[in-house]
Amino acid sequence: MTRTSRDRRFPRGALFGAAALVGLSLLATGFARFTGIGTTYAPDATAVQSRELRFEDRSDGAVTVYEVGSERIVDVLPPGTNGFVRGVMRALTRERMREDVGKAPPFRLTRWSDGRLSIEDEGTHESIELVAFGETNFAAFARLLQVRSASR
């Protein structure tokens, strides 16, 4: 006599084990959440330096970075360079288009007291922590905080 697939049943022990694992995970998470035991918290950081920026594509493929308010040129990103900066700004701009925000609100680049650097779209309130992408990519944005004016 052969067994068919209908005769096979899921092992009850495995089912109870999976349910117990899920239940234990929920209990541990709830315990940590309510007691604070086993959790870590990042201390509140304050903004050390901040700059509102506007990024504008040029016909030659370069991107001009302006300081909002003074309209000073902060930097010019030549064509084919600064791939990380371009990628981050492309992602933030895509979110603007999705939410139909427009180009008017600036982007705020902020250095925090704990050493982090973030860029926030003031139109969508989308924020990206730049420290997570490595030193080279961090430095690409950090130089936009330097008080200088690029030549056109």
Image: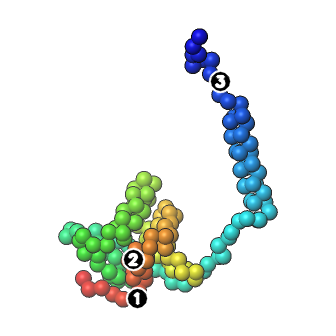
Q: Crowding at label 1, few (<14), some or many (≥20) Cα neighbours within 10 Å?
A: few
| Residue kind at label 1, given as amino acid type | Val
Q: Crowding at label 2, few (<14), some or many (≥20) Cα neighbours within 10 Å?
A: few
Q: Earlier in the sequence, mark 1 or mark 3?
A: 3
**Helix, strand or loop status at disc 3:** loop
Q: Which residue is located at x 44 percent, y 73 percent?
A: 134
> Circle 3 sits on which residue?
9
Q: Earlier in the sequence, mark 2 or mark 1?
A: 2
Instruction: Name the mark on residue 136.
Output: 2
Q: Is residue 14 above or below residue 39?
A: above
- Where is residue 2, by image quadrant? top right
Residue that extends furthest to the bottom in the rendered view of this protein:
148
- Residue 95, percent across and down? 43, 57
| Residue kind at label 2, given as amino acid type | Thr
- Where is residue 34, by image quadrant? bottom right
> Circle 1 sits on which residue?
147
| Residue kind at label 3, given as amino acid type | Arg
- Residue 20, percent across and down? 74, 42
**Helix, strand or loop status at disc 2:** helix
Q: Which residue is located at x 72 percent, y 55 percent?
A: 29
Q: Quadrant of the N terminus?
A: top right
Assess whether mark 2 and mark 3 are in contact (beta carbons under 8 angstroms): no
- Where is residue 138, by image quadrant? bottom left
